[in-house]
Image (cartoon, coloured by chain):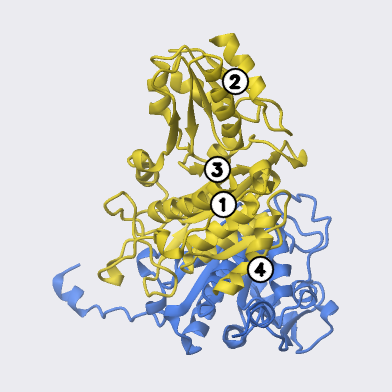
Chain colours: A blue, B yellow
């Protein structure tokens, strides 16, 4: 490039989330058409606009594509073992209750190998915000069946279709005692960002399910191009706040319900521990 | 108090303020004692949903800035192995107590053994170094728990206390010194510009300073192979550098880490090697053999890992035989044999677990090899 042309090239504008991203780790590993980046930036935007002290805010991830989020956020960030983000985050929060702890991980990580930890953290009402990017399969390992894969969907380990039923994650979260539960798709970024912000600012166990496409590993095997998935997110979803919790299955052959499903208050794990176990002076 | 209670009191004296546990015989009393005592001293106890979670939680607690601990027995130790590896890889100080019972599997839950010694060394996948101590009494478990915390803070690594059901459940007199007589160490803290801080750049003793979450260092902590900054790097070179750092901080400080106790080694013709509860058997066997006129010595391993290779190798040069006494079918015996390198015959007095070894059994072997 001649010198004059170089001088004329405008300086590329700074990314609005520059201060929250480890730009020295970009490019990220996420595939073209993947939904994680959108959910990730919604989470970062929510953190930034929430007014929280970001120095006291941490992100904890497990293993998988979504688990890589902790590696890109310029906060104290912990990329733990497979399924164990929540118990690690529990120790972090109990070790220093002044920290705001956000868990960002995938459906395979949080609900198959980590399922037990999820229900117990919700039961205790641990003051965590858990954001689950649900792409309906194990993307990192090449597209195997997950605890969230729809009935009959094809994956590399269900070549004739998934014989099992998937979890209804909001129902599971609600039944386990979560005090805030919402679901959006990556197409609904505004609502998603608002709900994440609400969840972060709320005391207690908050859970946000984000539906995002995995065109390379899931879409390809289920005749779903990236854009088609997004079209489904637009056309076959309905927003319904406070719905019947057992109507929340992710089944795009019918309608998938999005919205804010639970928003209630009960004492957190730490509040209960302090009241019950500590000797009052 | 019992060994288990003394262990818990030792942890509190060391400054432990977070315990994530899960009940298991014969370690439950440690969790019970911590659940009562921690809130009294401003700490936090939580009973997690399993040992996997317990181990994960104490790593989180450590990164929150607390001295953290868990306690378990064989089956739980197996479950903890995954996150013990994370603790080693991320150089997270914490203490894990294994009150050993008989295995494999559920085994004999209420009976003692020392059969997790190799699991302690190699239980988590991959290459690594580990520090493990083995106390022989309630009084010693109190002090060793403090030492374990100090070593874990000094070397930024998980440290094990490999005790057993017998020490754990035995009631003995324990003297707790005043707090100002107890030396407690803390992980080195970073200084200098926060934006230039490197999470794994070793300091003087090969150990990097460690900030806590929330202090403004924006640390990235990962179980992936990482560089000095903590960032994942998928290369053979990065793996070599990381492993070199992880191993050297232990290997270069063996004199500081390895503690042994020598009894009558100077004139000994046969030397017993033992640790934990079997050290008491060995002491008795040594004394009785000496009374019978046999020159028997005893090397007690206080630190079992890293192994006291140099001490054993030196003994092997000049004694008639080495006899390892342990409640298993030969684990540290393998290490003794390896370190002796064929210079002297190595024998094992051990059994499949469930009871203490009697001094008579040891004396019988001494007589055979003397």
**Residue at image x 65%, y 29%?**
B328
Question: N-terminal of the two: label 3 or label 4?
Answer: 4
Indicate which disc residue B348 carries: 2
- Residue A197, x across and y down, in percent: 57, 86
Indicate which disc residue B96 carries: 1
Question: N-terminal of the two: label 1 or label 2?
Answer: 1
Question: N-terminal of the two: label 3 or label 2?
Answer: 3
The quarter holding residue B282 reads top right
- Marks 1 and 2, how far apart in space? 28 Å
Q: Secondary structure at mark 1?
A: strand
Indicate which disc residue A60 carries: none
Q: Which is nearer the eye, B8 or A99?
A: B8
Q: Which subunit holds the residue at mark 3? A: B
Please identify the quadrant where the N terminus of chain B is shown: bottom right
Q: Which subunit holds the residue at mark 1? A: B
- Marks 3 and 4, how far apart in space? 24 Å
């Amino acid at each position: 490039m001649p010198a004059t042309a170089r001088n004329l090239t405008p300086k590329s504008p700074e990314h609005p989330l520059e201060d929250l991203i480890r730009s020295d780790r970009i490019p990220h590993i996420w595939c073209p058409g993947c939904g994680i980046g959108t959910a990730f930036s919604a989470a970062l935007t929510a953190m930034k606009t929430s007014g929280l002290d970001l120095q006291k805010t941490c992100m904890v991830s497990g293993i998988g594509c979504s688990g890589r989020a902790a590696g890109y956020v310029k906060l104290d960030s912990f990329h733990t073992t497979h399924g164990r983000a929540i118990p690690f985050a529990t120790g972090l929060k109990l070790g220093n209750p002044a920290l705001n702890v956000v868990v960002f991980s995938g459906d395979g990580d949080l609900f198959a190998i980590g399922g037990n930890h999820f229900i117990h953290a919700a039961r205790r009402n641990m003051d965590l915000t858990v954001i689950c990017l649900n792409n309906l399969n194990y993307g990192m390992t090449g597209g195997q069946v997950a605890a969230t894969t729809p009935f009959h969907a094809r994956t590399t380990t269900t070549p004739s279709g998934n014989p099992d039923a998937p979890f209804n994650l909001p129902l599971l979260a609600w039944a386990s005692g979560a005090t805030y539960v919402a679901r959006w798709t990556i197409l609904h970024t505004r609502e998603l960002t608002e709900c994440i912000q609400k969840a972060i600012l709320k005391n207690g166990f908050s859970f946000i399910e984000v539906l995002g496409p995995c065109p390379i590993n899931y879409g390809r095997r289920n005749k779903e191009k990236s854009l088609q998935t997004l079209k489904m997110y637009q056309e076959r979803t309905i927003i319904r706040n406070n719905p019947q919790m057992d109507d929340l299955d992710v089944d795009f052959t019918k309608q998938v319900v999005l919205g804010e499903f639970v928003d209630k208050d009960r004492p957190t794990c730490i509040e209960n521990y302090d009241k019950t176990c500590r000797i009052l002076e | 108090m019992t060994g288990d209670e003394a262990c818990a009191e030792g942890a509190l004296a060391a400054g432990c303020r977070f315990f994530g546990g899960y009940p298991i015989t014969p370690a439950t009393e440690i969790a019970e004692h911590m659940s009562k005592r921690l809130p009294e001293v401003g700490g936090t106890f939580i009973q997690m949903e399993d040992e996997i979670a317990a181990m994960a939680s104490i790593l989180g607690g450590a990164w929150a800035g607390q001295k953290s601990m868990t306690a378990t027995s064989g089956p739980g130790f197996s479950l903890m192995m995954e996150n013990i590896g994370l603790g080693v890889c991320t150089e997270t100080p914490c203490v894990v107590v294994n009150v050993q019972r008989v295995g494999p599997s559920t085994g004999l839950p209420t009976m003692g053994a020392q059969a997790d010694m190799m699991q302690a060394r190699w239980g988590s996948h991959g290459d690594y170094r580990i520090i493990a101590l083995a106390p022989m009494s309630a009084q010693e478990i109190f002090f060793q728990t403090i030492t374990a915390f100090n070593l874990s803070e000094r070397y930024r690594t998980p440290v094990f206390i490999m005790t057993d059901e017998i020490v754990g459940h035995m009631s003995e007199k324990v003297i707790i010194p005043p707090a100002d007589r107890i030396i407690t160490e803390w992980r080195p803290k970073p200084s200098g510009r926060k934006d230039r801080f490197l999470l794994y750049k070793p300091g003087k003793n090969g150990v990097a300073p460690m900030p806590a979450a929330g202090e403004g260092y924006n640390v990235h902590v990962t179980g992936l192979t990482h560089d000095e900054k903590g960032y994942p790097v998928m290369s053979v070179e990065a793996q070599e550098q990381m492993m070199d750092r992880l191993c050297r901080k232990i290997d270069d400080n063996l004199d500081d880490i390895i503690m042994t106790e020598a009894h009558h080694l100077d004139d000994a013709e046969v030397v017993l090697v033992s640790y934990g509860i079997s050290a008491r058997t060995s002491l008795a066997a040594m004394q009785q053999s000496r009374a019978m006129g046999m020159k028997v010595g005893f090397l007690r391993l206080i630190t079992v890992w890293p192994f006291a290779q140099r001490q054993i190798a030196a003994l092997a040069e000049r004694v008639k035989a080495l006899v390892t006494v342990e409640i298993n079918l030969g684990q540290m015996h393998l290490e003794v044999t390896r370190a002796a390198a064929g210079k002297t015959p190595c024998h094992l007095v051990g059994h499949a677990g469930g009871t203490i070894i009697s001094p008579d059994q040891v004396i019988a072997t001494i007589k055979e090899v003397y």
